[in-house]
Image (cartoon, rainbow, N blue to C red):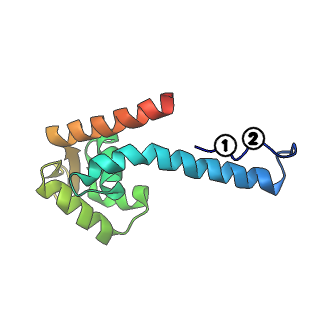
Amino acid sequence: MVDIYSSGPETTPDQPDDLRRAAELLFYAYRDFTAEPDRFLSQYGFGRAHHRVIYFVARSPSISVAELPAILRITKQSLSRVLSQLVREGFVLVQKAQADRRRRLLQLTDKGTALERRLSEVQRARIGE
């Protein structure tokens, strides 16, 4: 990658150029953080929304379907499409709650756990570089 910041005058943190540089670095970091998982997910026909669902279900086993749209900041309709695919392909299991049968709780299957582990390992390695 070309180092676009190696030359130029010294600046102070409150200058707009520093904020622009910080924003660019965040864009580059996000691009690199998601690149390998994106390639792997595409083999399944999945995208980042699938990754986020898998990630948060792994972090909060038995999370309810109703909680995810607020966490992910997606619509119920978008969640439904993604979640239906994950359930249909055997990555996520939906069960009714014991106390309130109207609540649907999510957990990863063994297949989903393996996928989440692989995606997270890649990202943890990237952060550790």
On the rendered structure, is 23 left or right of 119? right
Considering depth in this image, is 5 or 61 the residue closer to the camera?
5
Q: Residue 109: in sight, yes or no?
A: no
113 up-or-down from 51: above or below: above
Q: Do callouts 1 and 2 mark residues in contact (Cβ within 8 Å)? A: yes
Q: Identify the residue at image location x=28%, y=50%.
A: 41
Q: Position of 51 compared to 123: left or right?
A: left
Quadrant assignment, res 75? bottom left
Which residue type carries mark 1? Asp
- From this view, report whether residue 76 is shown above or below residue 8: below
**What residue type is disc 2 on?**
Ser
Task: Look at the numbered disc 1 and give the secondary structure of its residue.
Answer: loop
Q: Indicate whether 79 appears above or below 111.
A: below
Residue 117, position in %: x, y? 28, 35
At 62% from the left edge and 45% from the top edge, which residue is drawn? 2
Residue 72 marker: none
SS state under label 2: loop
- In this view, the residue farthest toward the bottom is 77
Q: Position of residue 77 (x, y in %)?
A: 30, 71
Image quarter (top left, top right, bottom left or bottom right) of the N terminus: top right
Q: Which residue is mark 2?
A: 6
Q: Position of residue 9 (x, y in %)?
A: 87, 45
The percent coordinates of residue 111 (x first, y second) are 16, 41
Q: Which residue is mark 1?
A: 3
Residue at 28% over, 46% down: 40
